[in-house]
Image: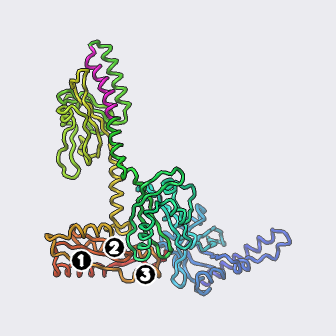
Amino acid sequence: MNYMKKIIVTAIIVILLSLSISCVQAEEHDFDFFTLFENHGAVMLLIEVESGEIVRANEAAVEFYGYPKNVLESMNIRQINMLGQEEVELKRRIAAEEKRNHFIFSHRLADETLRTVEVYSYPFQMGDVAMLYSVIHDVTEREENKILLHQKLSRLERAEQIAKMGYWELNLGISMFTLSEEARTILGFEEYTLSSVRIREIILPEYHLKRNEALRGLILRNEPYDIRFRIRRPDDGRILHIHSVAEYNPEKNTVFGTFHDITDQVTKTAVINRQRDIIIYSLIAFIISLFIFIWYLSFNIRRRKEAEQRLRITITSVGDGIIATDQHGRIELMNPVAQNLTGWMEKEAVGKTFKEVFNIVNEYTRELAEDPVEKVLSTGHIVGLANHTMLIRKDGREIAIADSAAPICDSSGNIHGVVLVFRDVTDEYANLKRIEYLSFHDQLTGLYNRRFFEAELNRLDILRNLPMSLIIADVNGLKLVNDAFGHKSGDELLRKAAEAIKSECREDEIVARIGGDEFVILLPKTDLNETERIVKRIQKKTSEIYVNTTAKS
């Protein structure tokens, strides 16, 4: 039946071509469609819309798919297309209705190889049979390169956004550095590409040996590259303190790392900035105190309303939360920012004690933090909140805050109340935690990294944690999986191995990835028998791992 159908379709094509040829100019009367179809270098298929059967395939298609011509022309397109049957039929109908004619598919060849193909498919009618004329191009390398480039760019963009660091790459073959935009800014260079000599010139001489040894240890012994040194910027001569972390890629013979300007931390500029903030908050508090003083002393209703209006405008204009209390610590006013941050409306809070509205605790100990208003009233001095202070809103949600409280005094120095200026530092705090997380975790598996493991080993190496056991494991055949099926499959293998190991360990046990395919488990207060039971559970769990290796990425 299928053979007869092909004969009928071929006859219809010949009839249609004969009719169309009679309408063209005389010099075109020798045009032979099937000769062109068969000998064209592009892969071409004629596919029946309803059934998906391949009616005809040219020589390029036979060569590309690797099937004999008679076999290929007896197959259905869903035997080649890696989409599900329903999805293949849906795409076929979309092409037949000309809603879309361009597709990207994954096709399987006769040797089981998967190739990414770009298909242009157009409908035509062969008598009563609806057909698709499809031209296929192999775009596997193009699509793989696009995916790899996108992944690399995404990783770099995410890293720069999260860490706010400059990135660099050293090509060891040609001794050339490539710098990111932020790295150029930190080091004071205009060029994106620099020789190793140029980089060495800006590093102060006393750090040359230290940096060289760290780089040699990374390349030759896979030792962590985590160093601090000083540079002299070539553009303005400033001396900066730099923190640099890097990893070595032996396959590409490159080193990829970060530059982080830590000059402010080293020179204790953070303390100066804190003092500057206190001065700014004190100035704001002084201005607000002046308006509050006027508001309290004014006996004239009109002047009192005008002063109150000016006060409201000033408070509303300030981007930080502001709460003012009387000399007994009872709230008298709150600006809109303070209402939003605390979850209390001003009309609800006025008259309540400061503690009732402003509930603050230490993030880690969960103990109540010292009341800043009470401290100002008792000491008469400006005070600031301790680090890791969390404000518990009216609805129970918590936000990290920084603040300063100052006394409201008259000309004689008598305290009439307190003004508190505070702001939400949740995002800043989250970014800091994110950076801390990245510095102690392996980005591929989510397990702890070598740096964290070594620190924990030193911390737990005490008498009360004995007996202490170590389990060291590696993933057999990782290089073979990478070579045969690509690094995507190898990464999947590592992730699944990490999940299996982690699932068989307790919460207080340290599981870390310390190398390419190496894992280690630190077991405090665990004897040999218990360790052997854990090993057996892990071996059983990992024996059930399955990794999709149908495509090489």
**Mark 1: secondary structure:** strand
Q: Quadrant of residue 518?
A: bottom left
Residue 417 image position (x, y, % from top left): 22, 27
Q: Quadrant of the N terminus?
A: bottom right
Residue 403 image position (x, y, % from top left): 29, 39
Check the image and name the residue furthest to the top.
Answer: 300
Q: What residue did someone put label 1 on?
A: 470
Q: Amino acid at mark 2?
A: Ile
Residue at x 43%, y 83% (from the top left corner): 480
Asked whether 139 or 285 is in front, the reply is: 285
**Mark 2 surroundings within 10 Å by alpha-carbon count, few (fewer than 14), some (14 through 19), many (20 or more):** many
Does 542 appear above or below 509? below
Which badge, 3 or 2, comes first in the chain's sequence?
3
Q: Which mark is residue 479?
A: 3
Residue at x 54%, y 70% (from the top left corner): 175
Asked whether 495 or 170 is in front, the reply is: 170
Check the image and name the residue furthest to the front.
Answer: 206
Q: Which mark is residue 514?
A: 2
Q: Is residue 85 left or right of residue 494?
A: right
Magenta highlight: main SS: helix
Q: Quadrant of residue 228?
A: bottom left
Check the image and name the residue furthest to the left.
Answer: 464
Magenta region includes residue 290: yes
Q: Quadrant of residue 350?
A: top left
Instruction: Report the span colored magenta.
Output: 280-298
Q: CA distance from mark 2 to mark 1?
A: 13 Å
Q: CA distance from mark 3 to mark 1?
A: 25 Å
Q: Is residue 50 left or right of residue 472?
A: right
Magenta region includes residue 14: no
